[in-house]
Image (cartoon, rainbow, N blue to C red):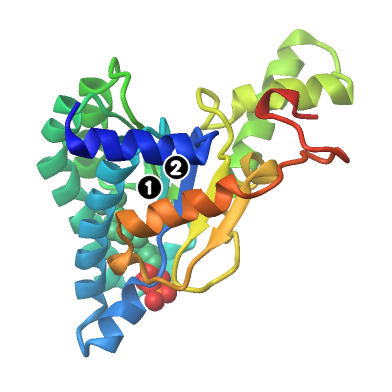
């Protein structure tokens, strides 16, 4: 074991239960650029570097699932040049990163309404998803043209179709139990920890169904400055929380109600 591996093992032992799934609202690129007298797009470029770091750090720390909010279904309302630049950066990320992610055993998936994305972007996503489909390391999900209410609407429509074919109306318990299987995140556990950077304290239409019992950690750090130490700090804060899932006493993850 290298010294670095030893350090991580000691840190993991101090944490106890690591979050299995971390979701991040990456916020503050524009303010980071503003503070330096740079255009917003420079903030997004630095944000991509922070994204690369976060993916690497999450895998190193032994967290299994990472879901990143890269572009919301509301972000189309931004100036056209900014939207174009965000999409260009995403394509650059996919082109430059897919081979390395694959080498590191990372599985990449994209959630969101892909129909509105440009054909070349969809093609890069498809290639990255199929190349990494069998990988068992970090399960990385990028939310792109994603909105939590949209997802719930899509899932509800799919469920209604399913029950129209089955020919009966399910009771509430059945709806709740089966609902997850209609969501874009059906193959992954719900986030244990949701981090939002830049001092904002909102969920902004991200993973609305899935975050019912997530712990939220808000940090003032702007996304381009977010680094491994900030990630470790957020996990440490999470580990000190008493997760009750609506019960009166502390329960482990398996005792959710
Ligand atoms: C919020 O900052 C950030 C975004 C809308 C985009 C997040 C995108 C990236 C980090 C880069 C692309 C991601 C990948 C996966 C390659 P903001 O512009 O709202 O900042 P502000 O609130 O300070 O204006």
What separation in Å lies between label 1 and label 2 (alpha carbons)?
7 Å
Query: Secondary structure beneath disc 1?
Result: helix
Is 189 placed left or right of 134 in the picture? Answer: right
Judge the density around disc 2: few (<14), some (14-19), many (≥20) Cα neighbours within 10 Å.
some
Q: Quadrant of residue 72?
A: bottom left
Task: Tell me whether the residue at label 1 lies in contact with that at label 2, contact meaning CB atoms closer than 8 angstroms.
Answer: yes
Q: Which mark's residue is nearer the viewer, 1 or 2? A: 2
Residue in the picture at 21% in, 82% down: 39
Q: Can you say whether 105 is above or below 241 in the image?
A: above
Q: Can you say whether 7 is above or below 200 in the image?
A: above
Ligand 1 is located in which of the four quadrants?
bottom left
Is 136 placed left or right of 22 in the picture? Answer: left
Q: Which quarter shows the C terminus? A: top right
Residue in the picture at 23% in, 24% down: 105
Is 159 placed left or right of 78 in the picture? Answer: right
Query: Secondary structure beneath disc 2?
Result: loop
Q: Is residue 146 visible?
A: no
Judge the density around disc 1: few (<14), some (14-19), many (≥20) Cα neighbours within 10 Å.
few
Return the residue at label 2. 113
What label sits on residue 157 in the rendered view? none
Q: Which quarter shows the N terminus? A: top left
Return the residue at label 1. 116
Residue in the picture at 43% in, 64% down: 75
In the rendered image, residue 161, in percent from the top left (x then y), is placed at: 68, 22
């Amino acid at each position: 074991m290298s010294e670095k591996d030893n350090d991580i093992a000691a840190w993991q032992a101090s944490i106890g239960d690591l979050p299995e799934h971390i979701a991040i609202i990456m916020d503050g690129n524009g303010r980071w650029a503003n503070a330096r007298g740079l255009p917003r797009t420079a903030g997004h470029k630095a944000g991509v570097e922070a994204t690369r770091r976060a993916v690497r750090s999450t895998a190193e720390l032994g967290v299994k699932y990472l879901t990143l909010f890269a572009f919301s279904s509301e972000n189309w309302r931004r100036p056209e040049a900014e939207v174009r630049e965000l999409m260009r950066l995403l394509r650059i990320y996919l082109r430059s990163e897919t081979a390395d992610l694959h080498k590191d055993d990372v599985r990449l998936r994209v959630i969101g309404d892909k129909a509105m994305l440009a054909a070349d972007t969809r093609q890069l996503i498809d290639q990255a998803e199929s190349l990494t489909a069998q990988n068992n390391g970090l399960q990385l999900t990028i939310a792109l043209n994603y909105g939590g209410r949209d997802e719930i609407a899509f899932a509800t429509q799919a469920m209604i179709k399913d029950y129209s074919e089955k020919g009966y109306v399910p009771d509430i318990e059945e709806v709740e139990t089966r609902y997850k299987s209609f969501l874009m995140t059906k193959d992954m556990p719900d986030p244990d920890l949701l981090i939002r950077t830049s001092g904002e304290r909102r969920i902004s239409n991200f993973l609305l169904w899935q975050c019912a019992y997530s712990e939220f950690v808000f940090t003032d750090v702007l996304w381009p400055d977010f680094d491994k130490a900030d990630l470790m700090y957020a996990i440490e804060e999470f580990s000190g929380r008493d997760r009750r899932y609506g019960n009166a006493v502390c329960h482990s993850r398996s005792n959710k109600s």
